[in-house]
Image: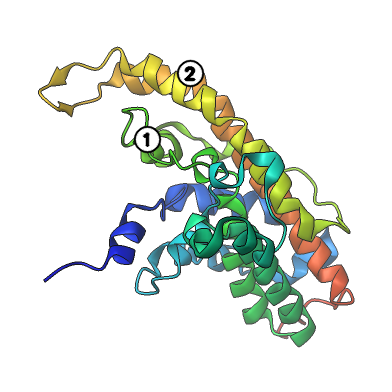
Amino acid sequence: MKTPLLLLLLVALPLSAWGDKGHRVTCTLALEGLPPSLHAWYAGRETEVEDHASDPDHWRSDRKEGPRHFLDMEPYGGPDQLPRTLEAAQAKIGGDYYRRGVVPWIIQDRWRDLVDAFKSGDASRVTMATSILSHYVADAHVPLHTTENHDGQATNQRGVHSRWESGLVERYLQVEAIKALPAEADPHILERPWDWLRDSHALVPQLLEDDLSADRTTPTDGQRKQRTQAYWMIFWAKQGPVVKGQLQLAGKHLGDAILTAWIAAGKPAGPAKPAH
């Protein structure tokens, strides 16, 4: 029995960005940066927001899910040539456009979901919509989610994707080392995903160079590499500030998106606390 080509492609795509810890950190930073009147919507629900932040990584049964997490820039001619609508994307590269990633448009859709959730007055809806939006915003801040060489396969660096976004985070990241930045209303929030992706893409060359540099310490056993503590320490020394910076920006931009959605919904008051 042959495995469908699309399924093979989706299996190879970078579906699990940041890992659970990174996605939780993004939510933590965003909520900490909200003004008190807005944070009231999340009072007592902070853990719930974090718990569901990785949900989209588990939606593998939906064959369309993989491309919702990234955008390959090379097929469009680089970061300065990116289309702003799905129609423009299809017109530029044809029917292959969806497989090349659609994360900026998914962010737009999930942001509108959050606006609707605030309008509904349902705190549970707001919590879940925030979690799901957070995932795709965080993914847009992963450099390797902006390139065809998403796992180092074109540069003999396979596995660099998980080494950077999960391996370093799980081994070394201390949440308290990242300062939450205050959320700001952004009237152009629906245009921002392209800026986030462009800035993330600019980090790719140095990321790959630093992985290669750290990997020179790795002994080889045939075709299989067993990376030592020296590799991880060197890679973190070089890329740790980038990892922390991208997570801080993801939290900041998520906070901006939440605040702007709340304003677009009319600044509804948070749910009343139950009487004791």
Q: In x, y percent, where is residue 200? A: 61, 38
Q: Is residue 43 visible?
A: no
- The correct choice, above or below, for 11 with respect to 142 in the image is below
Query: Considering only order in the chain, which callout, 1 or 2, is on the residue closer to the N terminus?
Result: 1
- Residue 44, horizontal then vertical, whole percent: 63, 69
Instruction: Judge the density around disc 2: few (<14), some (14-19), many (≥20) Cα neighbours within 10 Å.
Output: few
**175 or 81, nearer to the observer:** 81
Front residue of 130 and 103:
103
| In this picture, residue 192 sits left or right of residue 143 | right
Q: In which quadrant of the rendered image does the C terminus lie?
A: bottom right
* Residue at x 51%, y 35% (from the top left corner): 174
Q: Position of residue 185 (x, y in %)?
A: 87, 56
Quarter of the image for the N terminus: give it. Answer: bottom left
Residue type (three-letter) at the residue carrying disc 1:
Arg
Image quadrant where residue 159 sits? top left
6 over 165 or under it: above or below: below
Task: Name the quadrant containing residue 257.
Answer: bottom right
Which amino acid, mark 2?
Ala
Scheme of colours in the image: rainbow
Q: Residue 242's image quarter?
A: top right
Task: Write down the residue under mark 2.
Answer: 237
Circle 1 packing at 10 Å, graded few (<14), some (14-19), many (20+), is some
At x 10%, y 23%, the residue is 222
Instruction: Measuring from the top left, give residue 65's x and y in whole percent.
Output: 45, 67
Number of marks in picture? 2
Task: Determine whether the residue tagged by mark 1 lies in a helix, strand or loop.
Answer: helix
Q: Which mark is residue 78?
A: none
Q: Is residue 79 above or below residue 114?
A: above
Question: Which residue is label 1 attached to?
Answer: 163
Q: Nearer the viewer, mark 2 or mark 1?
A: 1
